[in-house]
Image: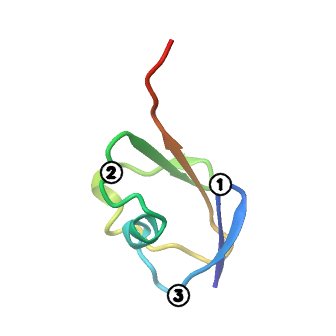
């Protein structure tokens, strides 16, 4: 099935949990990031249980330091 991650299309397996996609995209430490699916923030403790659906739009935001 296909989803979008930061506006880029990606193909993933059916019934893939959100945390698996984050690991595959290099966000395994998950520190300093926030994730929204279809404009709804998904709490970090729900990433392992959140099963993605076809055409979901995932937005990954990384916190940065600076002024």
Crowding around mark 1 (Cα neighbors within 10 Å: few <14, some 14 to 19, many 20+) is: few
Confirm or deny contact between disc 3 and disc 2 (CB under 8 A).
Answer: no
Q: Quadrant of the N terminus?
A: bottom right
User: What percent of the width, then of the height, locates residue 55?
Assistant: 68, 72
Question: Which residue lies at the image location 52% right of the left edge and 43% below the top edge?
Answer: 61
Which of the 4 image quadrants contains residue 20? bottom left
User: What percent of the width, then of the height, locates residue 56?
Assistant: 63, 67
Marks 1 and 3 sit apart, C-alpha to C-alpha, by: 18 Å
**Residue 6 - label:** 1
| Residue that carries the numbered disc 2 in the rendered image | 44
Question: Which residue lies at the image location 46% right of the left edge and 30% below the top edge?
Answer: 64
Q: Which badge, 2 or 1, comes first in the chain's sequence?
A: 1
User: What percent of the width, then of the height, locates residue 51?
Assistant: 44, 74
Marks 3 and 2 sit apart, C-alpha to C-alpha, by: 21 Å
Compared with 31, 11 (above or below) is below
In the picture, measured across the screen, residue 49 lies left or right of residue 54, that is: left
In the picture, measured across the screen, residue 52 lies left or right of residue 47, that is: right
User: What percent of the width, then of the height, locates residue 5?
Assistant: 62, 61
| Residue that carries the numbered disc 3 in the rendered image | 13
């Amino acid at each position: 099935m296909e989803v979008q991650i930061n506006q880029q299309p990606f193909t993933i397996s059916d019934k893939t949990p959100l945390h698996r996609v984050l690991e595959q995209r290099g966000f395994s430490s998950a520190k300093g990031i926030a994730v929204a699916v279809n404009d709804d923030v998904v709490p970090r403790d729900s990433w392992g249980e959140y099963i993605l659906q076809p055409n979901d739009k995932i937005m990954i935001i990384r916190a940065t330091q600076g002024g």
